[in-house]
Image (cartoon, rainbow, N blue to C red):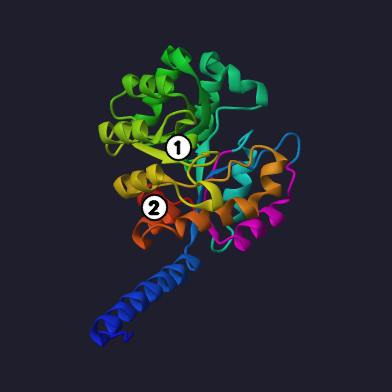
Amino acid sequence: MTVRIDFKQLMLAVAVTLSGTFALAENARSQERLELFDAHLHYNQEPNPFYSLDKVLETFRRNGVTGVLATSRPNKGTHQLVDAKSPGLWVVPFIRPYRIRADIGTWFSDPSIFDLIQDEYKRGYYRGIGEFHLSGNAAAGPLVKKTVDFAVERDLYLHCHCDETALLHLFAHNGRARIVWAHTGFSTPPARVAELMDKYKDQLWGELSYRYGITEGGGKLSEEWRNLFARHSDRFLIGSDTWINERWFSYDSLFQNYRAWLAQLPIDQARRIANGNARRLFGARSSN
């Protein structure tokens, strides 16, 4: 049997294949050059930090992290990161309403915490308040409203680890609140996250630490998250959440995993999530 080859079709197939290969290679090269912004960084100090400041700064450099949203318990850790003025590192400081770990469950009903927020704000460089924890109707209280109003009046963001009920209370307190939703809701499915982002345009951003389900087996980006990023790539940030020592141990692998699934996105989406959104949100008034 004689096989007849259509050379035009063959050359077209080769061209398409090569074009796709070159595009993937270029995307991979671009991903390797991405600078990363860690939008959930704690340099906690109870009583002393696990890593020295020099080791923390080296960890950032090693992972291509050129900016951090710093929020520490107590705020001394954030002061140290700001005061270090490390070359190549952009620090965006947030006021954390905690002195000790026990404040996590009581800050929203403790008037002395609002005094702490006011005193810290006098330092003149803060861009937000948080990370703070809220659940359900605990967010409806008067001290929470007072905190939200304080933030809105001073052009500050709120960084909240909360469920959807608490999130909605925050927006109900003040319609001009701007919220970075730590862990993007944990139990809130991507479809609902998209609805909330549609509703709160220019007010709600998602931070993706501890968000399981973004990838499937083999590290492949899930279809529902791929669709969410395609729709709202301008609304997400990535973070480490170094709240315990184990998160510092795994810092390298955390950001390797981020790079792995960012590399599966179109480069414009990846750049926004990696650092572009942080630049757009916080760049006008950088701390150093």
Q: Which quarter shows the N terminus?
A: bottom left
Q: Splitting the image into 4 quarters, where does residue 224 fall?
A: top left
Q: Look at the numbered disc 1 and give the secondary structure of its residue.
A: strand
Q: Give the CA distance from mark 1 to mark 2.
A: 13 Å
Mark 2 closeness class: few <14, some 14–19, many ≥20 residues within 10 Å: few
Residue 220's spot in the image, x, y percent? 49, 52
Which residue lies most toward the front here?
A: 1
**Mark 1 belongs to which amino acid?**
Gly
* SS assignment at label 2: helix
Residue named by callout 2 = 283
Amino acid of disc 2 = Gly
Magenta part of the chain:
49-71
Residue 90 visible to an observer of this rendering: no
Q: Residue at x 43, y 69 (%)?
A: 30
- Left or right, 67 with respect to 165, comes to right
Q: Position of residue 242 (x, y in %)?
A: 63, 42
| 19 to 145, vertically: above or below | below
Q: Residue at x 63, y 47 (%)?
A: 80
Query: Residue 118 location, x and y as percent?
Result: 49, 28
Q: Which mark is residue 128?
A: 1
Q: Earlier in the sequence, mark 1 or mark 2?
A: 1
Magenta stretch: includes residue 68: yes
Mark 1: few/some/many CA within 10 Å (<14, 14-19, 20+): many
